[in-house]
Amino acid sequence: MGNATITFGPALVAVLVLLAVAGTAVVQAGGLGRGRDVLVAAVRAVAQLALVSFVITAVLRSAPLTGLFVLLMFAIAAVTSARRAGRWANLPWTALAIGAGVAPVLALVLGAGVVPLKPIAVVPIAGIVIGGAMTATSQAARRALDELKARHGEYEAALALGFMPRPAALEICRPSAGHALIPALDQTRTVGLVTLPGAYVGVLLGGAGPIQAGLTQVLVLIGLLAAEAVSILVTVQFVAAGKLSSSAHRKAPVLATHQP
């Protein structure tokens, strides 16, 4: 099928710069936020991937280093979700929520031999699942906390009707937090029709055939659905129990009255 890899050169550099500048200009001119954030994110992506490209060469030669690298990815994901929720104190709870989704999925696909226990296979699969669980945890936490704040009166009304704090909070925040699964659902429903996701394209660029690429992508998508669903469920439970809260919500009665 020939060489389909993307090579480094002046044309690639020029295209990346143009895309980053265009995204920055659109966000700034359209009043969508700080255009600088787009540029910073682009620069960070280049720097981080350059560093990872060098590190991964050593990591893929050693099983212990592969395990440490996966743990590092997990730790960064947990920290990122804790920051998105608004408090460093959320770190243990975001770590548990992400781990609750990631651990069973990786255990199943690796234990069943579907994904070989080789660094070159473990690292990308683990990274994809951890990243998806991180995003789902962050979105679910923010949605649940915002919903509790906006509908505090309904929460108080539920308490007045005899609901215990946790069930009352769940009635308010659970539907909104469940929307965090929509991106994964949409991607799975439209795969092959609207988009060709990264795992499929990556396997193709690596020289495998379309069928093998399709099997890999199906495994990734369904694994992501399972991991994200569990992470969202655990996140909502932590929010309803008052364990996971933002700085804006930590003093609110809706969270202060929750019991584990």
Image (cartoon, rainbow, N blue to C red):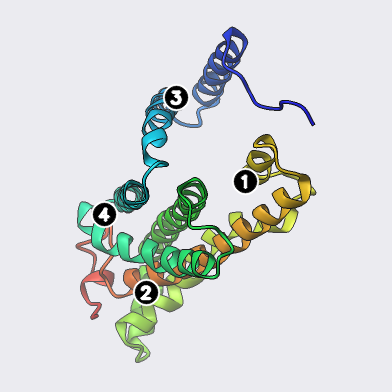
* Sequence-earlier tag: 1 or 2: 1
Q: Nearer the viewer, mark 2 or mark 3?
A: 3
Q: Are marks 3 and 4 in contact (CB under 8 Å)?
A: no
Residue 79 location (% of width, % of height)? 29, 49
Residue 171 location (% of width, % of height)? 45, 78
Which residue, given by chain and number where applicable, does mark 4 sit on? 248
Q: Amino acid at mark 3?
A: Val
Q: Secondary structure at mark 1?
A: helix
Q: Secondary structure at mark 4?
A: loop
**Gap in angstroms between the C-alphas marked 4 and 1:** 38 Å
Which residue, given by chain and number where applicable, does mark 2 sit on? 237
The label on residue 46 is 3
* Sequence-earlier tag: 3 or 1: 3
**Figure quadrant of the N terminus:** top right
**Gap in angstroms between the C-alphas marked 1 and 2:** 31 Å
Q: Nearer the viewer, mark 3 or mark 1?
A: 1
Q: Given the current orientation, which residue lies at the most extreme front position? A: 61
Estimate how packed mark 2 is, as few (under 14), some (14 to 19) or many (20 or more) residues with alpha carbons within 10 Å: many
Residue 116 location (% of width, % of height)? 54, 57
Q: Nearer the viewer, mark 4 or mark 1?
A: 1
Which residue, given by chain and number where applicable, does mark 1 sit on? 199
Q: Amino acid at mark 2?
A: Gln
